[in-house]
C-alpha cells in the first residue's frame, strides 16, 4: 500500500511541475555585440520568446519583448531569421502537448486497464475537441495561452482586438508570414515557406491523432509497453526539448539569408556554453551565451520524480503478482 501511495504522490508532484514549467523560462540566451556591450538577453519559453531580464518601463510589448526585437536587429546583420521564425508549430501546439503529457501521467496512476482506457479516451477526446475549437474556429486564438497570444501580438505589432476573431491556425500562418516578412527575402520564398509550414502542421495533427489512437488501442489490449510509455514519454521531456532546441539552432545557422550586410559561412549556434561569431575580415564579432534557465531545471526534477515513481510502481506490480 505504501508504494501505491508513494508512486502516485510523486506523479502528482511531477504533474504540478509540468504546469509550472509551461509558464517558466526554459533556456536563457545572451548576445553581445559592439552596439550592445552589455548584451541582449532573451528567454525561450515553450510558447514564445521573451525578454531575458525584467523591463518595467514602456508599453506592454516593450516589457515583454523589446530585448527579443533588439536581438533580431543584431541577427539581421548576419542574415539570420528572426527569433519568431523557428518552431511556429511547436509554440502553437505547446498547450495541447503538455495537456497530452499530463493525461498520460494521470492514466499511469490509475489501476485497471478498463479504467485506464476510459480515462485516456476521455482525456484525449477533450484535447482533440479543444484543439479543434482553437485551431479551426473563428476566435479560436483566444483559447490559446496568454503567453502565446502576447508573443504573436507583440511580434506582429498588433493589438489584441485586431486578432481576437482569428482562428488559431490562421494566427499561426499570419504570425509566421509576418516573421519571414521582416527579412529581405523574396515574397515568393516567404509564401513557399508558409505553405510548407501549413502542410507540416496538417501532418503533425495527423501524427498526433494516430499516436493517441495507438495509445488507446495499446491500453485496451493490455500491452505493457504502452503502459510504461505513459510515464517514459513525459520523463523524456528534457531530452525532447534539447533536441528540438538544438535542431532549430542548426536550422537558423545553416539557412542564413543574403540580406545581411555581413556574410559569414553557415555555422552551428551554441546550444550550451559560450562562443564567438566572427564577422569575417571586419574585425567585429558577436559573443553568445546559452544556458538552461530554472524551467529546464524543473524539467529535470520532474524526470527524476517520474523515474522514482516508475521504480516504485514496478516493485508494487511485482509484489501483486507474487
Image (tube, rainbow, N blue to C red):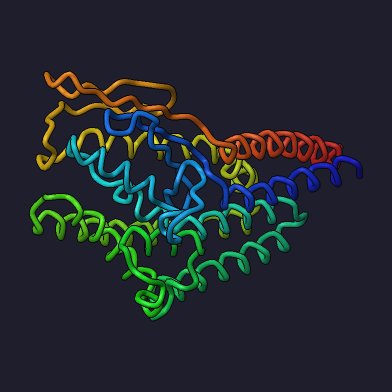
Residue 31 appears in the figure: yes
Residue 284 lies in what quarter of the image? top left
Seen in the image, is 24 located left or right of residue 49?
Answer: right
User: Percent position (x, y) of residue 40?
Assistant: 38, 37
Q: Quadrant of the C terminus?
A: top right
In the image, residue 125 sits, relative to residue 206, either above or below, namely below
Q: Give the residue drawn at x 68%, y 33%.
A: 304
Seen in the image, is 149 located left or right of residue 248?
Answer: right
Residue 106 lies in what quarter of the image? bottom right
- The number of discs equals 0
What is the residue that sits farthest to the right in this orientation?
1
Q: Quadrant of the N terminus?
A: top right
Q: Give the residue drawn at x 26%, y 38%.
A: 74
User: Percent position (x, y) of residue 207?
Assistant: 40, 56
**Foreground: 298 or 14?**
298
In the image, residue 195 sits, relative to residue 32, either above or below, namely below
Q: Give the residue drawn at x 76%, y 57%.
A: 112
User: Percent position (x, y) of residue 47?
Assistant: 46, 54
What is the residue that sits farthest to the front in this orientation?
57
In the image, residue 42 sits, relative to residue 182, either above or below, namely above
User: Percent position (x, y) of residue 246?
Assistant: 38, 34
Q: Give the residue drawn at x 50%, y 71%.
A: 143
**Foreground: 141 or 152?**
152
Residue 210 appears in the figure: no
Amino acid at each position: 500500500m505504501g508504494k501505491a501511495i508513494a508512486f502516485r504522490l510523486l506523479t502528482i508532484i511531477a504533474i504540478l511541475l509540468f504546469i509550472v514549467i509551461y509558464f517558466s523560462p526554459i533556456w536563457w540566451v545572451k548576445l553581445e555585440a559592439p552596439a550592445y556591450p552589455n548584451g541582449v538577453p532573451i528567454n525561450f519559453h515553450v510558447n514564445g520568446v521573451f525578454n531575458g531580464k525584467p523591463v518595467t518601463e514602456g508599453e506592454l510589448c516593450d516589457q515583454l519583448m523589446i530585448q527579443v526585437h533588439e536581438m533580431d536587429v543584431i541577427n539581421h546583420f548576419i542574415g539570420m531569421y528572426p527569433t519568431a521564425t523557428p518552431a511556429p508549430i511547436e509554440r502553437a501546439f505547446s498547450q495541447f502537448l503538455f495537456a497530452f503529457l499530463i493525461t498520460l501521467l494521470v492514466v499511469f496512476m490509475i489501476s485497471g486497464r478498463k479504467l485506464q482506457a476510459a480515462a485516456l479516451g476521455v482525456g484525449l477526446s477533450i484535447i482533440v475537441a479543444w484543439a479543434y475549437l482553437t485551431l479551426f474556429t473563428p476566435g479560436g486564438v483566444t483559447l490559446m495561452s496568454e503567453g502565446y497570444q502576447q508573443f504573436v501580438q507583440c511580434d506582429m505589432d498588433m493589438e489584441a482586438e485586431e486578432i481576437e476573431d482569428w482562428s488559431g491556425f490562421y494566427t499561426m500562418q499570419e504570425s509566421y508570414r509576418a516573421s519571414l516578412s521582416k527579412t529581405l527575402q523574396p515574397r515568393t520564398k516567404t509564401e513557399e515557406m508558409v505553405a510548407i509550414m501549413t502542410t507540416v502542421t496538417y501532418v503533425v495533427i495527423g501524427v498526433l491523432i494516430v499516436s493517441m489512437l495507438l495509445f488507446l488501442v495499446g491500453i485496451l489490449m493490455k500491452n505493457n509497453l504502452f503502459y510504461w510509455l505513459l510515464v517514459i514519454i513525459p520523463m523524456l521531456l528534457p531530452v525532447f526539448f534539447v533536441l528540438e532546441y538544438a535542431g532549430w539552432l542548426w536550422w537558423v545557422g545553416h539557412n542564413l539569408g543574403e540580406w545581411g550586410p555581413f556574410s559569414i559561412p553557415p555555422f552551428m549556434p551554441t546550444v550550451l556554453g559560450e562562443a564567438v561569431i566572427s564577422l569575417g575580415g571586419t574585425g567585429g564579432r558577436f559573443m553568445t551565451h546559452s544556458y538552461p534557465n530554472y524551467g529546464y531545471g524543473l524539467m529535470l526534477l520532474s524526470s527524476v520524480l517520474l523515474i522514482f515513481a516508475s521504480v516504485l510502481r514496478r516493485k508494487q506490480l511485482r509484489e501483486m503478482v507474487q
